[in-house]
Image (spheres, rainbow, N blue to C red):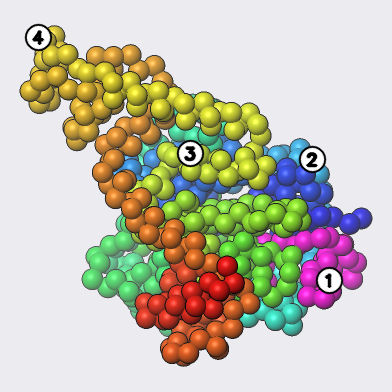
Amino acid sequence: MKYDVIVVGGGHAGCEAAHIAAFMGKKTALISMNIKNIADMPCNPAIGGTAKGIIVREIDALGGIMGKVADISHFQIKMLNNAKGPAVRSLRAQADKITYPKNMLKVLNETENLDIIEGMVEDLIVKDNKVCGIVFEDGKSLESESVILTTGTYLKGSILRGAENTPSGPHGERRSNHLSDKLKEYGFTIQRLKTGTPPRIKKDSIDFSKMSIELGDDTYWTFSFDNKPSYDINKQQRCYLLYTNENTHKIILDNLDKSAMYGGYATGIGPRYCPSIEDKIVRFRDKERHQLFLEPESLFYDEWYLQGFSTSMPIDVQEKMVRSLEGLENCVISKYAYAIEYDAIDPLQLKPSLETKVVENLFTAGQINGTSGYEEAAGQGLIAGINAVLKLRNEEPLILKRNEAYLGVLIDDLVTKGTKEPYRMLTSRAEYRLILRHDNADLRLREYAHQVGSITDKQYQNLINKKNKIKEIKDLLQVNKLKLNDETKQIFKENNLDIPNGSISYEALLKRPQIKIDFLKNFMELNYDDDILEIVEIDIKYEGYIAKTYKEVNKMIKLEEKQIPEDLDYDKIVNLASEARQKLKQVKPISIGQASRISGVNPSDIAILAVYLKKEYSKDE
């Protein structure tokens, strides 16, 4: 049988890629080495987090399934940074490690046009520099029009604990021994990266009385724009906060040479923004303690995850480290921490569509591209799946700009700047984060999803209805004015708010920092859903800042509109700095805007490039 799309790997990237390709009407195969490991969560038992929660909302807006599955699979959920500005708010849910994969597999099994096949892929079928299918380890093959590689940490994966190096994927699974070598033969640059996971602790051996309780929110939340909350807000599971101490730090520093990383046993480069506990202690020696969390992994077994305590120390040292923590003095470690090294490609060899520049119709997504995190992987998988389908339709790819989505920032960073360490999405990476918020992901992206066919007509109609309601509320607040009288003045006094000097529009009133949109319900009917009222409140309160952001966006868009021909010969451009020439030839940017973001390309190089393009290509217009 010949498929339109073959997806290799059943992790979070693979699930999204396979589902969306099949949903968009293409005959799709998802190849997983072990079907039981589809949507596995080998590390953190959570979906979302700072910036990551916004990515999950973007995935949902574009037709992905991570948010929907998370909504029915968690046992605690909260909005992070809720006391801060709207640009940094982000959902995080404690997902059940048994329930989440089970629900994801159910969705995939019910998806039309999708076959799930168990097997290990060790090679590609490549003809005339185009991918034509995959080859299993036993020599059997499957043909396809396109292939999406989402191999996670399985490419020559090695588990590290101290000097101990065990060839393996996560959980002791078999690894792929040959696929990365084959990719190298096809012309890919392969790099070695490293990530890790902390120990798991038996619940009955933990003294929770010595720790601070971390509760879920008393507000209902969902990742998906299409779901209603389905959980009991009063039955959310507790998590716990604890800290490292002086003794913990001493044990780590005394045994630093036994760590896989500091002892010289690791060759891969680890994540800067999700470091091991020994890396934290070394890099931040001035800190007396580091924050840790204990989180239940599942309601179906009693292992707890020690968040923030990733390590590659030997088992005997791990025992001492963990038992130095308050509340864990007598704990039983059910699974020891480890680091895992694996092969990845250089993401500079990718187009913004996530199709590779090396082999046509071959797409990659997730950790093979140098990222870390379930959410970053799922988002790439979704974009790769959509673009594989669009390529087969002979349509333009979906390329999100930096002002349109965190996914746009993520992919642009990868294909423009590359990465030499596992990339993690942070709010600070998004220069336009005030308009890339949790609340407006559907308003930003569902129009695109409708255009490419990755959402249903009903979902699109819901978007239209939502936009109409937002406009309706804004018009109401702009046109209607607060009438001051003794009764209305009393309401202000009771809420310790300054009384306006005279008649004022509700829009102007809402711009006051201390006024919330719920307060306006004292004077007018606002029978709308809370999520719609939230958008209106943010848009009005931050109107000036948002307008300023869009001015910056417009400058960026003008640079993005200045396209660079794919076949441009940079050697013909005189006066370019040698580093700039080298980087431009390597990245092959599609626009002046992308070229300006390449490390090593200076403003003077951009000016020379712009002049050359205007001179050489304006005469063809």
SS category of the residue bearing label 3: helix
SS category of the residue bearing label 4: helix
Q: How many angstroms separate mark 4 from mark 1 (CA)?
A: 80 Å
Residue occupying image coordinates x 66% and y 69%: 356
Taking 61 as reference, is 533 above or below it? above
> What amino acid is found at the position of numbered circle 3 in the picture?
Leu
The tag on residue 443 is 3
Q: Which residues are magenta?
A: 126-155
Q: Which residue is mark 1?
A: 125
| Residue 40 rendering spot, x and y as whole percentages | 64, 52
Query: Label 1 near label 4: C-beta < 8 Å?
Result: no
Taking 201 as reference, is 496 above or below it? above
Q: Is residue 173 magenta?
A: no
Sequence order check: which comes first, mark 3 or mark 1?
Answer: 1
Task: Answer whether residue 265 is visible to the viewer in this image.
Answer: no
Q: Disc 3 vs disc 1: which is toward the camera?
A: 3
Sequence order check: which comes first, mark 1 or mark 2?
Answer: 2
Q: Is residue 138 magenta?
A: yes
**Would residue 603 be found to the left or right of residue 37 on screen?**
left
The tag on residue 486 is 4
SS category of the residue bearing label 1: strand
**Would residue 431 be found to the left or right of residue 311 on screen?**
left
> What amino acid is found at the position of numbered circle 2 in the picture?
Glu
> What amino acid is found at the position of numbered circle 1 in the picture?
Ile
- Placement of the N terminus among the 4 image quadrants: bottom right
Front-most of 320 and 42? 42
